[in-house]
Image (cartoon, rainbow, N blue to C red):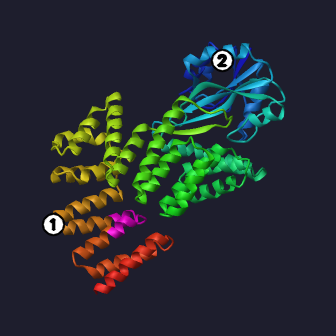
Amino acid sequence: MLTLSMIVKNEEKYLEDCLRSVESVVDEIVIVDTGSSDRTLDIAQKYKAKIFHFDWVNDFSAARNFALEKSTGDWILYLDADERLREKDKKKIKTLLLGSNKRSAFSLVVNSINEVNNRAEKMNYVRLFPNNPKIKFEGAAHEQIVPSLLKNNYKIVITGIEIIHLGYNISKEELQRKAERNLSILLEDYKNKKSSYVAFQIAQSYAMLDKEREAINYFSFSLKDAKLAKEFKSLAYRYIAAYEAKKFEWEKALENIKMSLNEDKRQPLSYFIAAKILLSIKNFPEADRYCRMALEANKQSTVEISSSITDYVILIDEKIILYLGLGVSINGKLKESFNFYYTELINLLKKNKDYFEIDFLYQIINNQEIKFDELKYYLNFISKDNLEVITELLKDYQFSSVKIKIIEELVKKFPNNSTLLNFLADENNRLGKQEIAERLFNQSIKEVPEDPRTYFALITFYIRTGKLYLALEIAEKAKYVFANVPEVLNRMEIIKNKIQGYL
């Protein structure tokens, strides 16, 4: 007999699809409600669930363990309301339990769909195990059942059976509300037990809340524990690498991304970040190589997941990798690579029937004039993930009025974007509209003061227009802004000395 064990609160949006996905598989449905005020319990009753109430005490394990106490089946399957079984895996579960002894627990692949951020996450989780009063969940948030199973000498079996998780397929604001909720519980848990796993989860919550320094502190603490799972170590090093890259600390960024890949060579996101770092330091052949490795790792991870019980792989939308590859090949003038990424991208767009995107790319690359009334269709597909590549492609586009119109529309769509503002400034300067160019460069510095590229661009502009004192003023200002970024500071000092030599 198999029991579905769940804890819920206000899950009317998801619950019915979850219960429908398992109704032919489970023999008993136990639902513990922690305070719903919507139709959740009505839906549960529709599926003849045994409903129990639990006063919420800021502890997910406490609620989960209460649900276990109310479960009478020989086996436990636990799901959240925003999860569902795949149709093709239902028979697999029945077959699995018929041929299994009671000393095994089963790990399923939780596939977290995240269309909002164009990435998915796959992780092995033990979700199916024998019902035994000695088996308990641990951890106030991001609760775990594996430590209890291993403590009681259960064998963990990897199944490949997949659970689709929709809980991350929400807006950033909703994700951040979830992160805030979990963070308060995790921090309280951490006071009682300073484990590397809890520190890692705290860091993840801070990262989701865009609190980078706090995230770095907790990731760094978690990495001190040699027993932390390699997948988690890889993700921690990857986050630190991306953080160092934002500060233009390229050596530290490269060191950490290499550590990330040393821990786990299957992470597409780590290869992707490595390619972006290498592109930034203009090592185009290596950036190209890592881009291709990101593509390969992504393909491998979509069809398989390893035998580790903590396996955790973050996938990336293939289109984003292909656009990065295009950017690398354009900047590095790598003709063969450009043809490779462009062909792969067009094939993918055809498969997805993204015909406006195909038309736009074809016309830009082949210097064909785009009609103004078509722009509204073309601009829809441009996102923060392909924006810089589109900008690079536009640099060689010959129809200036169309080019400027596109960039002006993109500035409206992506305000406070230094890449766009600088490009628009360059175009106006090229057309002899120096006052507009100067205003745009200064606007870019005001809105994105942490981007050194704008300072270099404005200094170059002032030098070429003979305004050396203004160029020197910007160089002095940049020295204070980037006082803690040696690479930028050194370049500014060289520029400052050259300007003073002309004066």
Dot 1, crowdedness within 10 Å: few (<14), some or many (≥20)? few
| SS type, badge 2 | helix
Q: Name the residue under label 1.
A: 432
Horizontal side of residue 179 vs 369, given as left or right: right
Horizontal side of residue 243 vs 349, given as left or right: right
Q: Position of residue 423 (x, y in %)?
A: 28, 59
Closer to the camera in the image, 32 or 376? 376
Q: Is residue 388 positioned above or below 35 on the image?
A: below
* Magenta-highlighted residues: 444-456
Dot 2, crowdedness within 10 Å: few (<14), some or many (≥20)? some
In percent of the image, x 25 and y 38: which residue is there?
377
Q: Within the image, what quadrant is residue 92 found in? A: top right
Horizontal side of residue 403 vs 217, given as left or right: left
Q: Position of residue 76 (x, y in %)?
A: 73, 23
Closer to the camera in the image, 218 or 499? 499
The dominant secondary structure in magenta is helix
Q: Mark 2 points at which residue?
A: 93
In percent of the image, x 41 and y 73: which residue is there?
491
Q: Do the residues bearing badges 1 and 2 touch, measured as CB atoms within 8 Å?
A: no
Residue 299 shows in this picture: yes
Residue type highlighted by circle 1: Gly
Q: Where is residue 460 in the image (x, y as percent from the top left)?
A: 29, 71
